[in-house]
Image: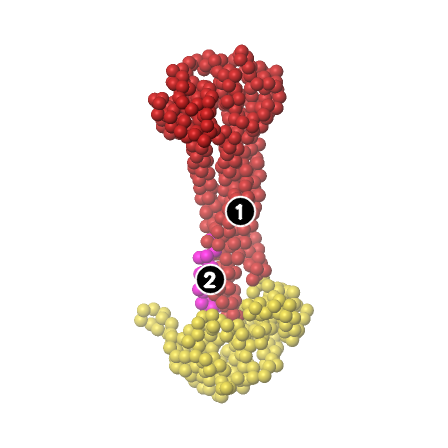
Chain colours: A yellow, B red
């Protein structure tokens, strides 16, 4: 079995701004990410890094080109099959945390498991364990509005880990946090203890990017430099 | 999913409460108005089931007995002709007027059904199963006496020996009937036929009540009367039941229809609320989809929310409609009694749920079609 988890071939994403003007958010991007890689995707605002993350995370469909997840051509899959891959194999961490405001930390972490049909008791137990791992054992029943940004992001990491994914995609995870808290979050992400676990972080913070094993630099929708 | 749906509808409490009230009003109207037509139906079938062998003959041939009965005028000659038709066991002519009862209750004037009947034929006039609660039946020569129904006795507080005034003439109450469930009898006053003719200044009759020799041939006798006597219509109980049934259905259809419109407006309120709610939660829906919620999950979540809102509204509406129908009985002093049958309750709840689900369908579909990327960008 191939050790490549994600591969893109000639990936293009165009947005039509007006009738005559088409923006190439991604232009013929070829990348290949191995299982266990820790990669930073860097680039300026508007370079296409978020678009690339959406493609890799199977949240969006390309205009041209193909994405392969674990060797499977994603374009051949139905919406439900793609959703299932997202649910079971990909964990997302967003800049805005994106927790469900009405749910407690515990319930937010349980949610992906409940979506996956895992029984409530098992989900509760695992959510408690994950929140302990990110140092939030005292905040289990707090809602996002009662937590600091760093705490919310830790809940988001625990949620991303809920279904034991193969890959975590973090979109500017430190973007809304102060430097110290940002470092803590990166440390938590880096120290996720799982064999062959892949971590992809989008960032424009060079300090964060330098911690990664490899960097993919994007400019105007094209790959400039693949240090891997 | 259910827990999340409950949390979602309690998020905007005021808006949810207003939406619930929208459904509540509609369903309460459906239940209370529907209970009246159910009440009528029960009342009518109760008073008809014990008089299966009866034929009522009135003047004219325009089809509807209820429109024609109080304006019907049969001459002595016609009455004699009717009575001489073959196959008749017993027959009696009556006078029938709809009047109003003076009362000081402040709730308007309850209807009074004034009937003139030959005292010796009084048991032909009242259907089988009618029982006197006190006093005695009218007899020949009881010119200054009247029989009264249960509702009249209750409303006016009349007992045997008391006086009731009809068209400015006093009658002494000779007998009071027990509650029977038929407005014609319960709210009726029966006086001797010839006195009634004097009182209403007429020598005509409203109707002839006919019992056939053979109950199995009731329709044949009715046909024979219509064939041999010119200008009369003969209605059998079965036809009566059918006509009343149609009228009750029409009343029910009309009143419930009006109420249903207000409930549909409530349903639109649910749709509006759910559209707003989906718009406000666009980002959350995007997150749900990103972390693995299928389109079906999103549709179910929104539908559960809208169904919950309408179910609560329906339940409260059912309760309020129930009390409104009881209140109606009280206000009209039993003239119009609302009955909330299990059928009406179940249909109203199903209607509420249906409105909620239909109202939720479009917002749910819209939410499920949101692209997660677009939804996540939404601030």
In the depicted structure, whether residue B233 falls above or below residue A125: above
- Measured from the top left, where is residue B3 in percent x and y? 59, 60
Q: What stretch is highlighted in magenta?
A: B359-379
Q: Mark 2 points at which residue?
A: B367
**Looking at this view, is B285 or A93 the one in front?**
B285
Among numbered discs 2 and 1, the one appearing first in the sequence: 1
Residue at coordinates 50% horizontally, 16% vertically from top-left?
B118
**Looking at this view, is B180 or B357 the one in front?**
B180
In the depicted structure, whether residue B161 falls above or below residue B2: above
- Is residue A48 magenta-colored? no
User: Label 1 marks which chain's residue?
Assistant: B
Question: In the picture, residue A197 is in which quadrant?
Answer: bottom right
**Looking at this view, is A208 or B325 the one in front?**
B325
- Measured from the top left, where is residue B339 in percent x and y? 54, 38
In 3D space, how far apart are the residues under numbered discs 2 and 1 (Cα atoms)? 31 Å
| Residue at the outermost left position | A20
- Measured from the top left, where is residue B231 in percent x and y? 35, 22
Residue at coordinates 50% horizontally, 40% vertically from top-left?
B34
Name the side, left or right, on which B306 lies relative to A127: left
Q: Mark 1 points at which residue?
A: B346
């Amino acid at each position: 079995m191939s050790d490549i988890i994600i591969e893109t071939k000639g990936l293009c994403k165009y947005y039509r701004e007006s009738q005559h003007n088409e923006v190439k958010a991604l232009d013929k991007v070829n990348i290949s990410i191995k299982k266990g890689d820790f990669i930073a995707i860097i680039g300026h605002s508007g370079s296409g890094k978020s678009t690339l993350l959406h493609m890799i995370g199977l949240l969006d469909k390309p205009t041209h080109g193909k994405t392969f997840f674990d060797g499977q051509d994603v374009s051949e899959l139905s919406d439900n099959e793609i959703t299932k891959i997202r649910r079971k194999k990909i964990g997302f961490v967003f800049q805005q945390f994106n927790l469900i405001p009405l749910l407690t930390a515990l319930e937010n972490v349980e949610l992906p498991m409940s979506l996956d049909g895992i029984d409530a008791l098992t989900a509760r137990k695992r959510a408690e364990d994950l929140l302990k791992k990110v140092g939030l054992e005292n905040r289990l029943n707090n809602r996002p509005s009662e937590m600091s940004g760093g705490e919310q992001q830790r809940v988001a990491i625990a949620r991303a880990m809920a279904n034991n994914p193969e890959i975590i995609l973090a979109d500017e995870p430190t973007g809304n946090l102060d430097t110290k808290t940002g470092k803590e979050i990166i440390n938590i992400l880096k120290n996720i203890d799982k064999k062959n676990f892949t971590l992809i972080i989008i960032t424009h913070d060079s300090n964060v990017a330098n911690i990664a094993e490899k960097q993919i630099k994007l400019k105007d929708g094209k790959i400039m430099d693949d240090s891997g | 999913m259910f827990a999340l749906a409950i949390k979602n509808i309690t998020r905007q409490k005021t808006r949810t409460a207003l939406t619930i009230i929208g459904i509540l009003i509609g369903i309460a109207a459906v239940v209370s108005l529907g209970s009246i037509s159910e009440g009528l139906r029960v009342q009518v079938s109760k008073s008809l089931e014990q008089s299966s062998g009866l034929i009522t003959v009135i003047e004219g041939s325009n089809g509807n007995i209820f429109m024609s009965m109080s304006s019907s005028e049969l001459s002595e000659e016609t009455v004699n002709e009717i009575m001489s038709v073959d196959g008749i066991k017993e027959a009696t002519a009556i006078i029938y007027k709809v009047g109003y009862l003076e009362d000081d209750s402040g709730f308007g004037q309850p209807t009074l059904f004034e009937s003139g009947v030959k005292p010796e034929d009084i048991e032909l006039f009242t259907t089988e199963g009618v029982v006197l609660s006190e006093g005695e039946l009218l007899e020949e020569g009881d010119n200054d006496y009247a029989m009264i129904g249960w509702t009249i006795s209750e409303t006016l507080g009349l007992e045997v020996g008391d006086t009731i005034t009809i068209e400015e003439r006093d009658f002494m109450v000779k007998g009071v009937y027990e509650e029977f469930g038929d407005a014609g009898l319960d709210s009726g006053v029966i006086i001797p036929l010839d006195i009634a003719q004097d009182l209403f200044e007429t020598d005509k009759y409203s109707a002839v009540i006919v019992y056939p020799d053979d109950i199995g041939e009731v329709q044949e006798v009715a046909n024979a009367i219509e064939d041999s006597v010119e200008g009369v219509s003969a209605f059998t109980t079965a036809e009566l039941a059918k006509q009343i049934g149609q009228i009750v259905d029409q009343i029910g259809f009309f009143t419930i229809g009006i109420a249903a419109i207000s409930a549909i407006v409530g349903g639109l309120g649910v749709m509006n609320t759910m559209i707003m709610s989906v718009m406000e939660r666009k980002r959350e829906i995007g997150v749900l989809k990103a972390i693995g919620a299928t389109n079906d999950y999103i549709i179910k979540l929104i539908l559960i929310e809208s169904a919950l809102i309408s179910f609560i509204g329906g339940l409260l509406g059912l309760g309020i409609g129930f009390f409104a129908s009881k209140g109606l009985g009280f206000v009209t002093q039993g003239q119009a009694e609302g009955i909330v049958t299990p059928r009406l309750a179940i249909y109203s709840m199903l209607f509420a749920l249906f409105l909620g689900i239909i109202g939720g369908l479009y917002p749910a579909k819209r939410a499920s079609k949101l692209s997660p990327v677009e939804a996540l960008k939404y601030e």
